[in-house]
Amino acid sequence: MSEAPEAGFSLELNEDVRDVRDWAHGFAADVIRPAAAEWDEREETPWPVLQEAAKIGLYSLDFFANQWMEPSGLGIPVAFEELYWGDPGIALALTGTGLAAVSVAANGTQEQMLEWTPQMFGSADDIKLAAFCSSEPNAGSDVSAIKTRAVYDEAKDEWVLNGVKTWATNGGIADIHVIVASVEPEFGSRGQATFVVPPNTPGLSQGQKFAKHGIRASHTAEVILDDVRLPGSCLLGGKEKLDERLARVREGKRSSGQAAMKTFEASRPTVGAMAIGCARAAYEYARDYSTQREQFGKPIGDNQGVAFTLADMATRIDAARLLVWRASWMGRNDKDFTNAEGSMSKLYASETATFVTQNAVRILGGNGYTREYPVERWHRDATIFTIFEGASEIQKLIIGRQITGLPVR
Ligand SMILES: Cc1cc2nc3c(=O)[nH]c(=O)nc-3n(C[C@H](O)[C@H](O)[C@H](O)COP(=O)(O)OP(=O)(O)OC[C@H]3O[C@@H](n4cnc5c(N)ncnc54)[C@H](O)[C@@H]3O)c2cc1C
């Protein structure tokens, strides 16, 4: 990743970001939205949509890297809002690889980033996927409980990984898996490291594929690691850095690199932007519906009861976006998250998505409850934003600890 630039915060999007927003919106409106219901029903990765996106460069390392490095920090949140406005399930299928690539950028060396991230996306003719695998059956919110073990075989300079990962987006169908594993179990999250598993590595297989409540176009599955042998170069950040970190922990010094937490911190506002896209889709649909649907001889939106609900929906979406943009700008411009502003943005945006989509269903009445109308799907999709990348309660723990300085439990 390039040096963080100093860009002043502005609500006026620069021309590059505006262009990307309009481009992503066009793809979301023309390609993603019309395909959404079909892939939700099929519960499969929407390969034809990925291919369309790859053809125009929207599913590509270039696109993600350029947006990630956009100096204002608003490239990713603005583009993601549009894609998730199109459809959250398909958008996650399109962006899941990018989230895995971020973990390589956050934990790997420059050399490792250059080696692995292009292989995660492949090319327009030969699309590849990547998966980030941290969660385990007994280690979801509690990342320190990860049981997957990475043992170093010094004679061969190889790492041997064993364990079961769960809930992995693109898990098992990805070409490259990024795995968080425990090297020194007694050190908890401070004894963990992140590994890249190259394509076709023996010992890695897909376990159960989950049938889900929402975002059903995104593939979610277990990943089984059975004596997976990796060259030493697959340890992100390198062995020397890991050994130094473990030595610091042994001496009782503070460790700075908690592998999984680092990845989550970098991507929290991004998840907030996804939630805003979903919320905006439902809000716009309900707003338009309220001006068309008549009961008691007038549009339902002409009742304060409905208009006030729409007012709350619109206000919360804008407030969430401001928090997401602030945190994204802070992250890109290397500001300290003194009040856990990244977590604030994810917490507020995800809760906003559930609030807005639930009210959209209610404004559409019986229609809102059927699969004839998309708000039902957005309502199912919205809940995920309060669960993954740290559930809402965990965001509150992080914010609470940060603002009080106490070890809130
Ligand atoms: C569709 C989907 C995709 C996912 N994709 C990925 C992925 O690509 N990679 C990956 O690694 N993981 C992924 N996850 C996993 C996700 O990050 C976890 O589900 C999430 O971290 C929560 O963990 P859990 O499900 O084990 O819930 P638990 O940790 O068991 O939490 C259950 C409930 O208890 C609450 N809780 C837990 N601890 C506390 C506490 N200390 N204080 C207050 N409340 C608490 C939680 O907030 C939650 O409400 C995905 C999950 C889903 C459903």
Image (tube, rainbow, N blue to C red):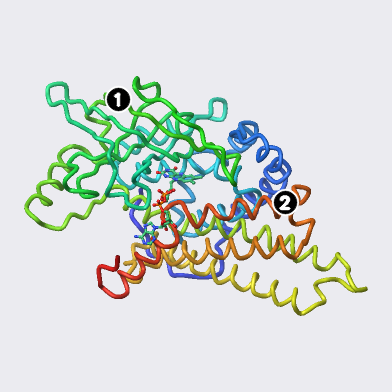
Image quadrant holding the C terminus, namely bottom left
Amino acid of disc 2 = Pro
Note whether 128 is above or below 145 in the view shown: above
For this view, does 212 lie left or right of residue 39? left
Mark 1, ligand 1, within 8 Å: the answer is no
Would you identify the image quadrant in which residue 12 lies? bottom right
Residue at which label 1 appears: 228
Residue 371 position in % (x across, y down): 74, 47
Q: Which residue is drawn at 61% across and 31% down?
A: 47
Residue at which label 2 appears: 374
Would you identify the image quadrant in which residue 50 lies? top right
Mark 1 surroundings within 10 Å by alpha-carbon count, few (fewer than 14), some (14 through 19), many (20 or more): some
Residue 17 position in % (x across, y down): 56, 57
For this view, does 73 lie left or right of residue 228? right
Disc 1 element: strand
Mark 2 surroundings within 10 Å by alpha-carbon count, few (fewer than 14), some (14 through 19), many (20 or more): many
Q: Residue at x 34, y 62 (%)?
A: 334
Note whether 272 is above or below 34 in the view shown: below
Residue 297 position in % (x across, y down): 93, 73
Identify the disc placed on residue 337: none
Q: Earlier in the sequence, mark 2 or mark 1?
A: 1
Residue 181 position in % (x across, y down): 27, 39
Q: How many marks?
A: 2
